[in-house]
Image (spheres, coloured by chain):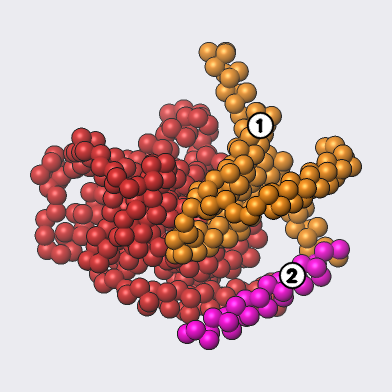
Chain colours: A orange, B red
Amino acid sequence: MASIDRLLQFVVSEVFLFYVFALAAVASALGVILQRNPIHSAFSLIVTLCSLSAIYGLLGSPFIAVLQIIVYAGAIMVLFLFVLMLLNVRREEPSGGRAAGAAAIVLALVLAAQLCTALAGAGTAPAAGFDASTPSFARVLFGARFVYVFEATSILIVAALVGAVLVAKKEL
Amino acid sequence: MLLKIVVMTHILLGLFSLMTLVERRVLAFMQFRLGPNRVGPFGLFQPIADGIKLFFKEEVMPAAANTWAFFAAPMVAVTAAFMAIATVPYGPPFTLPFTTIQVTPQIADLDVGLLFIFAVTSLGVYSVVLAGWSANSKYSLLGGLRSSAQMFSYELALGMSFVGVIMLAGSFRISDIVAAQGGSVLRWFVVRQPLAAIVYFIAAAAEVSRTPFDLPEGETELVAGYHTEYSSMKFALMQMAEYINMITVAVLTTNLFLGGWNPGLPFLPVGGLWGVAYFAAKVLFVLFVFIWLRGTLPRLRYDQLMHFGWKALIPLAALNVLVTAAVIALWER
């Protein structure tokens, strides 16, 4: 009984869950680029987004976790899949020659170097008073520092929406 | 905790199987028929018979189907359905009769409860997409496309409709929203937010594809929509997810608009098991309304459905948000 208890405690411990979701995120991210069928790639991306959301939740911010799912996994990816299914995209064949491959490797190395420097520069875990709950998140977002940026983003999105309607209107 | 999950799952599964029977019996009553009444008293054992029948049916899978997606679709459907219902409260905390054990009838009380449910139900769309696409059959694909477009469109109206409620309650936490409706029946959000309640109920009916929004399953044109190619237990799982989603919507409607476990009349006893009883009565009433609608209304045409969602429900929901915000800004502050 005691060993079962310990096993249960381990299974719901933060460290274990973090590694589970981190592994899922990396594996599915590899799936996104390694699969030939675009629909399979799209589904892998959904798994990646959900795993990231779980990691946000583990970091103590359920609000960000839920937003990640609503916005990316719930809305944007549905549209992606919709287009893929409607256009009936076939299997992707490898394209581009040697030069394209070489360029890709160089670009990937540059990106990797950048990521490494960024990670090396980043600090470790946040200080003890760190609070990522919904109210504190709201206070930061709607505080004096970010409120104008936030409103500007909203206006930008509304403008994009109006533009999309205008473009679509010609076809109606 | 674990025990609570087990108990809740079984109550839900019981309610699901009961609903399949009640739905058929009530529909039959409305249409001057008898309905299934052969198995057990009043046909009460019909769900069990159905379950056994589905277990022993042959499992058929289309030869051209995409195997993993075909298997994943019912799993995604059921997982999303159960995850959504894990965060709603089913009543106030009460003591078990004849003991001193305190029970809170809720599995997880999240800070962002309402948003979580919204997020998880939006993941439920993928089961439809997967099912429709993986079977490699034209009826499934058409049904899946229709269904996902419908769910996607009405999700917007659904999300907008409860913004007013959140503003008035000042919290995403469902137990806080219920607490904000305590006292008289006039405090219920169905009275204070009538437009939101109407938009919510219509959008929710569309979200769970109930008549008059059951186009995904328009059997006259699409055989059975996205689950055309499913048979045996996979079909049962799809069906189960649909009913569980319907129960989730009923529970949410009760919590958000019908005062949750508040009786609404000042002379009635409050709290404890009474609360659970009021809550159950309200949920059953909403479920009955769903069946009632199915017995009454014809199905919408697909273009009408889309026009209604985008051009009527979403503007109305947005209007409700604006008016509520204005009222709060002018009077309550």
Residue at 29%, 40% in the rendered image: B233
Q: Is residue A136 left or right of residue B135?
A: right
Q: Is the C-beta separation of discs 1 and 2 under 8 Å?
A: no
Work out whether disc 1 and disc 2 sit on a shared chain: yes
Q: Which mark is residue A153?
A: 2
Residue at 53%, 67% in the rendered image: B156
Q: Is residue B71 left or right of residue A12?
A: left
Mark 1 or mark 2: whose residue is earlier in sequence:
1
Classify mark 1: helix, strand or loop: helix
Q: Is residue A153 magenta?
A: yes
Q: Residues within 10 Å of mark 1 (few under 14, many from 20)?
A: few
Stretch of the chain drawn in magenta: A145-172
Image position, residue B62 (x, y; %): 29, 46
Query: Which residue is at the front of the view, B68 or B191?
Result: B68
Q: Residues within 10 Å of mark 2 (few under 14, many from 20)?
A: few
Query: Which residue is at the front of the view, B297 or B196?
Result: B297
Q: Main secondary structure of the magenta part?
A: helix
Label 1: which residue? A19
